[in-house]
Image (tube, rainbow, N blue to C red):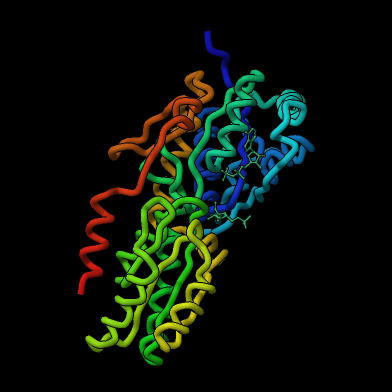
């Protein structure tokens, strides 16, 4: 028989993402509505190991749904990669009476959650990362806000690039995944996108296209480079040297991780937070919440971590077709 959950802990781990607060809020309020106590754990697995843990009430999450970042703070915790650190985390759960834990983060954080589940703590993961790189789910909290932030920044770069008739290289985040780059390529109307998952066009061809565009009277040339491809500063130098067209590289960086979450992020975060508590309350453990084909579902963590996902071929084709001039 599954054990009754009396106290749930909640933490955010890995890179922060807009909407993490909305997810935390949903966990807290859903649990309280079910008569379950909630403990907030600061700074990810670091705070779990050190006991940086406090009781949360409904007011602890007031005025947070619209805030970027994470009120629980976040961290990458090397100690938790080892069994000793994981055991200290499980022991600390017992000290604070935490019998269920919600971990909001990415694949790395879910690996930690799986280890804790193996040590007797019921754990549920919620996908929170701007990178959209979690295979089991069609959506990860933070992606929409990050893409909108990048889109607005790139629109601004385009204004100045057009005025000066320059070529712009813009590098967007995503670690080893090109989702932000692909989306910005389409929504910003870029001339080219370079993604880590796909074979990209040769540099000679990229340069030929820039020169052809110039001949056709194009005033700007926007190339989106995914972080996983990198090298945008060097690419800009090479393009300028060969074409004689002034070329500037901009690395958007961490501004993509901040800001008030969009409605989409708040909605998914609220639903996923509630779902995580529902799963714990029904005795489930070692699961990840996912949004799949329009439904909120769950997968075993090991099953979720074994899944693979790739950039949609159709979006890729559309992106290429829309680049055609
Ligand atoms: P994300 O969760 O966004 O993928 P990371 O990969 O940085 O971010 O992982 C966040 C944290 O999760 C790590 O700092 C570590 O504490 C924990 N973690 C990552 N991988 C493992 C693992 N294999 N076993 C236990 N804990 C892990
Ligand atoms: O996973 C989110 C992310 O912003 C990635 O896009 C990026 O590669 C990484 O985190 C940056 O990490 P840090 O904040 O440690 O520089």
Q: Residue 105's quadrant in the figure?
A: top right
Q: Position of residue 228 (x, y in %)?
A: 50, 56
Quadrant containing ligand 2 reads bottom right
Residue at point 53%, 70% (across, down): 251
Rendered view: 96 above or below 171: above
Q: Position of residue 141 (x, y in %)?
A: 46, 48
Count the marks: how many?
0
Q: Position of residue 100 (x, y in %)?
A: 60, 26
Q: Position of residue 108 (x, y in %)?
A: 58, 39
Q: Residue 154's quadrant in the figure?
A: bottom left
Near-viewer residue (19 or 314): 314
Rendered view: 290 above or below 227: above
Q: Residue furthest right?
A: 50
Left or right, 85 with respect to 235, comes to: right
Regarding residue 6, the answer to whether it shows in the image is no
Q: Residue furthest bottom?
A: 164
Residue at point 71%, 28% (across, down): 86
Near-viewer residue (130 or 3): 130
Residue at point 48%, 73% (across, down): 235
Q: Residue furthest top?
A: 1
Regarding residue 232, the answer to whether it shows in the image is yes
Left or right, 307 with respect to 77, comes to: left
Residue at point 67%, 46% (across, down): 76
Left or right, 302 with respect to 307, comes to: right
Q: Residue 243's quadrant in the figure?
A: bottom left
Near-viewer residue (285 or 282): 285
- Classify the position of the C terminus by image quarter: bottom left
């Amino acid at each position: 028989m599954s054990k009754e959950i009396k106290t749930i802990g909640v933490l955010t781990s890995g890179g922060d993402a807009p909407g993490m607060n909305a997810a935390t809020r949903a966990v807290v309020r859903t649990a309280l509505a079910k008569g379950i106590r909630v403990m907030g754990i600061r700074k990810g697995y670091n705070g779990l190991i050190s006991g940086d843990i406090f009781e949360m009430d409904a007011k602890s999450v007031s005025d947070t749904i619209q805030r970027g970042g994470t009120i629980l703070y976040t961290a990458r915790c090397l100690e938790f990669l080892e069994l000793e650190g994981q055991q200290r985390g499980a022991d600390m759960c017992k000290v604070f009476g935490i019998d269920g834990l919600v971990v909001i983060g990415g694949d790395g954080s879910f690996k930690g959650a799986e280890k804790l589940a193996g040590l007797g703590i019921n754990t549920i993961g919620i996908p929170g990362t701007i990178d959209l790189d979690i295979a089991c789910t069609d959506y990860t909290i933070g992606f929409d806000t990050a893409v909108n932030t990048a889109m607005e920044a790139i629109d601004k770069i385009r204004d100045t690039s057009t005025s000066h008739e320059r070529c712009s290289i813009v590098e967007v985040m995503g670690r080893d995944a090109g989702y932000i780059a692909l989306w910005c390529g389409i929504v910003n109307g870029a001339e080219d996108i370079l993604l880590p998952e796909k074979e990209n066009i040769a540099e000679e061809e990229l340069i030929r296209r820039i020169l052809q565009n110039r001949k056709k009277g194009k005033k700007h040339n926007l190339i989106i480079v995914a972080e996983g491809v990198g090298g945008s500063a060097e690419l800009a130098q090479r393009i300028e040297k060969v074409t004689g067209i002034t070329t500037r590289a901009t690395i958007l960086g961490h501004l993509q991780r901040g800001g008030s979450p969009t409605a989409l992020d708040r909605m998914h975060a609220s639903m996923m937070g509630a779902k995580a508590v529902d799963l714990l309350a029904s005795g489930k453990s070692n699961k990840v919440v996912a949004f799949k084909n329009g439904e909120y579902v769950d997968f075993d963590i090991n099953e979720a971590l074994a899944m693979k996902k790739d950039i949609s071929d159709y979006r890729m084709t559309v992106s290429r077709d829309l680049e055609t001039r």
